[in-house]
Image (cartoon, rainbow, N blue to C red):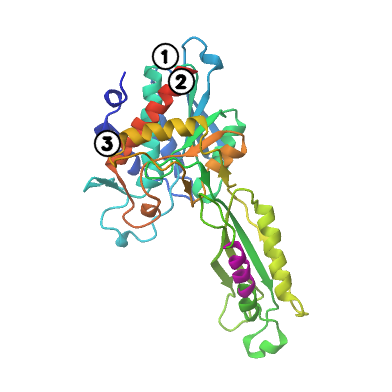
Amino acid sequence: MGAHRSLDGLALTALLRQLVAVESTNPGTQEAAMADAVEAQLRGVEGIALARVETLPERDSLAAVVAGTAAGAFAGPRVILNGHLDTVPVDDPAGWSVPPFAGELRDGHVYGRGACDMKAGLAVQIALLRRAAARRERMRGTLIGHFAVGEECGEPGTRSLLEAGFGGDVGVVLEPTSCRVATAARGLCHLRVRIAGRSVHASTAGAGDNPIWRLPAVLEAVAAHRAALAERGHPLLPAPSCEPTVVRAGVKANAVADALELTLDRRLLPGETPAGALEELRAHLAAAGAGDPGWAVEAQLLPGAFPPAEIAVDAPFAARLRAAAATVRAEPGPQPPAYGTPFASDVGHLVEAGIEAVTFGPGRIEHCHCADERVPVADLLDTAVALSRALDETFDRG
C-alpha cells in the first residue's frame, strides 16, 4: 500500500478543522472535550486499542496502540507518536482576522487556536494510527499514540502515559518544525525570585522596607547571569537564556509592599538541569546582596520543568525519517543533516526515559501562540507521508 494512496490530504485537512473547532485551552479542564474528539476518531477501528490514563483529576490523557501481527512482531520496535491535547488561551479575539475556533481554510492554511500547536500534529497521529491498523499484518512492532494533557502548562501528561506502561524504543513528538527532523531541544524551567520587605503605610515608608527598591540590584544580577549564559554554545541550539517575564508587588497604592516576586524563564541546554540552573541563579543573587544587611532575596524552582533533549544526529530512526522527509518536501535538495528546536516540549521527557526521540511536525513555531495562528495544509500531508515511509521501513525491518 503506497503512502500517498493511503493518506488523503483533503481528509487530513477536514480532520484538522474539526479538531480546531474543539476548544481545549489550558489552564482549565477543556482538554476533556479534545480527548473525547480524538477517541471518537479512533474508537471502533479494528486493530486500535484505546486506554485512558488519569493524569490529573478530570483530566485524562489517551493512549492508542496498534500491535503488529507479522511474524516476530512481539520482538519488534515500539514507536511512539506523541502530541498534546491542550492549547494556550486566546487573549483577545478582536486581534484575529478569523474566529479563533472556526478552523477556517484560507490561502492554503488552516487558521485557529491550536492549528499549529499542535492539532495539526494530532491529525497526523490519528491518520497514521488508522493506517497502521489497516496494515498491521505487515508490521513487526507496535505503534503507540500519546495524546497528553497539560503540556502547555508543564503538567505531567506524557510522564503519566510513560508511567502507565506506554513507553517505547523510538519516539516522534509532532510539534511544529517545518517538517525538519530535530535531534536536540532546549529544556525549560521557571524560577521565582522573592524579595522580602516590610509593609507599612506609604506615608511612613521609612518605617518599613520597600522590596521594590531592591529590584534594580536583582535585575543587574540576572543580567550578569544572562550574559554568562550567552557565552555557552551548542552546535544545534541557541545559547541558554534567563529572561524576566513577570513582576508582582504590592496590593494598594498607599501601602509599601511586603514582598516582590519576579518570575524568570530559563532555557536549558543539554547537560544543564533545573536544579543546577537554580543554584547558578542563587550564586549571582548572593553576590549582588553582599554588603547589604537588609538583603532578603530567595529563589525557588517552580513546578513543570521540561528537561533538554539530545540524541545522536545519525540515530537510526532519525536518519530514516530525514531521508523520507527529503523525498516529499517541495523544496529541492536534501534536508539539513542536523537541527534542534529552540523551544522545549515533551521530547525531553521521552529522551529522559531512554527513548530515542525526535521532534518532527507540520507548521512553524513562529505561527504558534499568536493571533491568526495557522499551519500550511501542504505540511500536513508532507509530515504524514514522510512519517509513514519511515514507519514502514522501521516495522518492515522489525
Quick check: is 58 in the magenta stretch?
no
Report which quarter residue 226 is drawn in. bottom right
Q: Is residue 183 left or right of residue 189?
A: left
| Total count of labels | 3
Spatial CA distance of label 3 from label 2 is 28 Å
Which residue is rendered at x = 42% and y = 16% of the image?
136
Callout 2 amino acid: Phe
Per the image, label 2 sits on a secondary structure element best described as: helix
CA separation in Å, label 2 and label 1: 8 Å
Looking at this rendering, what residue extends furthest in the left direction? 107
Label 3–label 1 contact, CB within 8 A = no
- Nearer the observer: mark 3 or 1; the answer is 1
Sequence-first tag of 2 and 1: 1
Q: Amino acid at mark 3?
A: Ala
Q: Amino acid at mark 1?
A: Arg
In the rendered image, residue 226 lying in the magenta stretch gets the answer yes
List the residue tagged with mark 1: 138
From the viewer's side, name the closer residue of 389 and 233.
Answer: 233
Task: Please provide percent x and percent y for residue 47.
Answer: 43, 17
Q: Are marks 2 and 1 in contact (CB under 8 Å)?
A: yes
- Viewer-nearest of labels 3 and 2? 2
**Circle on res. 395:** 2
User: Residue at horizontal 32%, vertical 25%?
Assistant: 3
Residues marked 3 and 2 touching at CB (< 8 Å): no
Q: Which residue corresponds to the image point at 37% horizontal and 35% vertical from the top-left?
A: 325
Q: Which mark is residue 14?
A: 3
> Earlier along the polypeptide chain: callout 3 or callout 2?
3
Which of the marked residues, 3 or 1, is nearer the chain's N terminus?
Answer: 3
Tell me the distance, in whole angstroms, between the alpha carbons under discs 3 and 1.
28 Å
